[in-house]
Amino acid sequence: MNRAERRTATTELTWFKSSHSGAEGGDCVEVAATADAVLIRDSKQPAAARLAVGVDAWSGFVRMAVGH
């Protein structure tokens, strides 16, 4: 567990599923934001390990992904 996850362990997180995820299941990614990190998990295995990235890194990824 990293620092961002330890701080959020006692705080309820709000998870958002990708708008590209279909209703039929398949590959689904969810994200939750904290003050200093974005947590990423597999929606089919919510209790499994999570990936934490910095807010700046996440912003850069989203800009690249949407082509802006």
Image (cartoon, grey):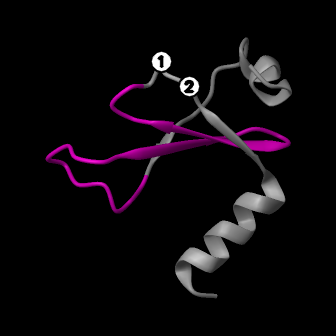
Does 44 lie within the magenta span?
Answer: yes
Q: Is residue 4 above or below residue 24?
A: above
Which dot marks residue 49? 2
Residue appearing at x 20%, y 43% in the figure = 25
Callout 2 crowding tier (Cα within 10 Å): few <14, some 14–19, many ≥20: few
Tag 1's secondary structure?
loop
Query: Foreground mark, 1 or 2?
Result: 2
Residue lying at 19% horizontally and 48% vertically, measured from the top left: 23
Depth order, front residue of 61/12: 61
Please tell me the numbered disc located at residue 47.
1
> Residue at left 56%, top 25%?
49
Quick check: 16 left or right of 63?
A: left
For residue 65, side relative to residue 12 (left or right) = left
Measured in 3D between alpha carbons, the distance from the residue under mark 1 to the one under mark 2, in whole angstroms, is: 7 Å
Residue 68 lies, in percent from the top left, at: 64, 88
Q: Which picture quadrant has residue 1?
A: top right
| Amino acid type shown at disc 1 | Ala
Q: Is residue 14 left or right of residue 43?
A: right
Tell me residue 40's x, y (percent): 57, 41
Q: Is residue 16 above or below residue 18?
A: above
Image coordinates of residue 21 in percent, x first then y, are: 31, 55
Disc 2 residue type (three-letter): Ala
Which residue occupies 80% across, 25% down? 2
Query: Callout 1: 10 Å neighbours few (<14), some, many (20+)?
Result: few
Range drawn in magenta: 18-45
Helix, strand or loop at label 2? It is loop
